[in-house]
Amino acid sequence: MSEKGKIREMFPGGNTTAGSFFHFKYMIAPATNRVFIIKGGPGVGKSTFMNGISREMVERGYDVEHFHCASDPDSLDGLVIPTLGVALLDGTAPHIFDPGVPGAVDEIINFGEFWDTSLLEPCKPELMRINKRVSMQFQTAFRILRQAKMAYDQWQWYMEEAIDHRKYNRVSRLLVESVLEGAVPNYNTAPQIRHLFASALTPKGILDYKETLIEKDMKVYTVKGQLGTGVKQIIERVAKAAEEIGLNTEQYHCPIEPDKLDMLIIPAIRIAVVNYSPPYHFDPKNLEGVTVTGEIDLNICIQKDILSEYEEERQDAELRFHELLEKAIFHLAKAKEAQSEREKYYVRAMDYDKVDKKRNEILKRILSYV
C-alpha cells in the first residue's frame, strides 16, 4: 500500500434530549478478529494511545474509523481498522465492554498498571469533589435538553398541522424509487444495519463529521425542510426500503431526536441520503468529487394558509428551543472543564514511557495480522 489511508470519523453515542444515548455495539463488525479493550481512568492516555496507532496505520495505507466522544470530541472512544478486523475500544464507564471471547478475540489492556497509586490516594477527597461537579453539570445539561425537547415538539406540532400529506407521500415514493433504481436485491443473507451518529451535541457546540463519511464517487440526495415537514421520516423510508431488498445500510441518527435518522449511506450502490436542514450546516456540494443527484425540498408540502394561523406560537417555540439548546451546551462545556481538571491528577501519576512501550507492542501485534 503506497497511498495514505483515509479516516472516517463518527460518534458512537450522543448527548441527546433523551439523555446519554449509545450505539456502542455497532462500532465493530461481527467478524472482527481482535478487540483490545482499554481500561483506565481519565487522562491516562487512552485516546493518545489509539491516535498513535491510527497514525501509523494511515501512513501504511490502511483506512481507519475514529469514534469520537460526544462529551469530549478531541478524545476517542474507539479505533477500528476494518481491513484487518482489529478494534481498540475505551472500556471505562460509560463505555462498558466486556470480553465476549476472552483471549481468542478480546483482551483487556489495563492502564492502571502504569500509574503510581501513592500519588492518587492523597487526592481522593478532591477527586470525589470533582466527580460530583462533573455529574451535576451533565445532569443539569440533560434536564435542560429535556425542556428543549418540549419546545421542539411544540414547534414540530404546529408544522405537522400544516403538511399536505398527499403531496408528501408522493415525494417520498419518488425518492425511494430514484435511490433504489437499478439496485440488485440480495435475499440470500439478512442485511447488516449499522446505527451511529455523524453529528453530536458537544461542549464545542454541534459538531458534524459527515464530510468524512461521504466518499468522492458517491451520489448524494439532500433532503431539506422546516422542522415537522418529515425530513427524518423520509430518510427512514428509504432506509426501510433498502433493508427490504437486502441491502446493508449505515444509519446515522439525529443528536436531538436519537430515534430518528439524519443520514443514510447504502454502500453497495454508493448512495447517501442526507438531512440538509437547520440547525446543521453541512453542505455536500462543497465536497470535492461528490455529485448531488437530487435535491428534495419538503417545504413545498407546507400549506402556508394553515401555518399562518399558528405562526406566532411556532416562532416562540422555535426561539425557546434554540435558547435552551445553547444553555445545555454551556453546561456540557462546564462538565468538560471539570473533567479536564480531574485529568491533571492522573497525568501526574502516569508513567507514559510504559504507555509508549505498550503502544509499540500492540502496534507490532496489529501489523502481524497483515
Image (cartoon, rainbow, N blue to C red):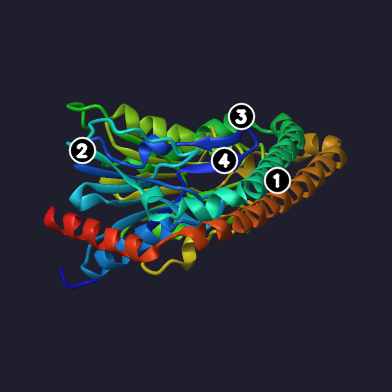
Frontmost residue, 71 versus 220: 71
Position of residue 2 in the picture relative to residue 81 (left or right)? left
Q: Residue 123 at x, y = what percent?
A: 61, 51
Q: Is residue 156 visible?
A: yes
**Identity of the residue drawn at 60% across and 54% down:** 342
**Would you name the residue on which mark 4 appears?**
231
Mark in the foreground, 3 or 2: 2
The answer to which quarter of the image holds residue 241 is top left
Frontmost residue, 200 versus 98: 98
Q: Residue 199 at x, y = what percent?
A: 53, 50
**Identity of the residue drawn at 22% across and 66% down:** 61
Whichever of labels 3 and 2 marks the residue nearer the N terminus, that label is 2
Q: Are marks 3 and 4 in contact (CB under 8 Å)?
A: no
Q: CA distance from mark 1 to mark 3?
A: 48 Å
Query: In terms of secondary structure, where does tag 2 sit?
Result: loop
Question: For the C terminus, which image quadrant?
Answer: bottom left
**Would you name the residue on which mark 3 appears?**
165
**Would you name the residue on which mark 2 appears?**
105
Q: CA distance from mark 2 to mark 4?
A: 41 Å
Whichever of labels 3 and 4 marks the residue nearer the N terminus, that label is 3
**Would you name the residue on which mark 1 appears?**
133
Q: CA distance from mark 1 to mark 2?
A: 38 Å
Residue 155 position (above or below residue 332): above
Question: The residue under label 2 is which amino acid type?
Answer: Val
Question: The residue under label 3 is which amino acid type?
Answer: His
The answer to which quarter of the image holds residue 167 is top right
Question: The residue under label 4 is which amino acid type?
Answer: Val
**Identity of the residue drawn at 36% across and 50% down:** 113
The answer to which quarter of the image holds residue 324 is top right
Q: CA distance from mark 3 to mark 4?
A: 13 Å
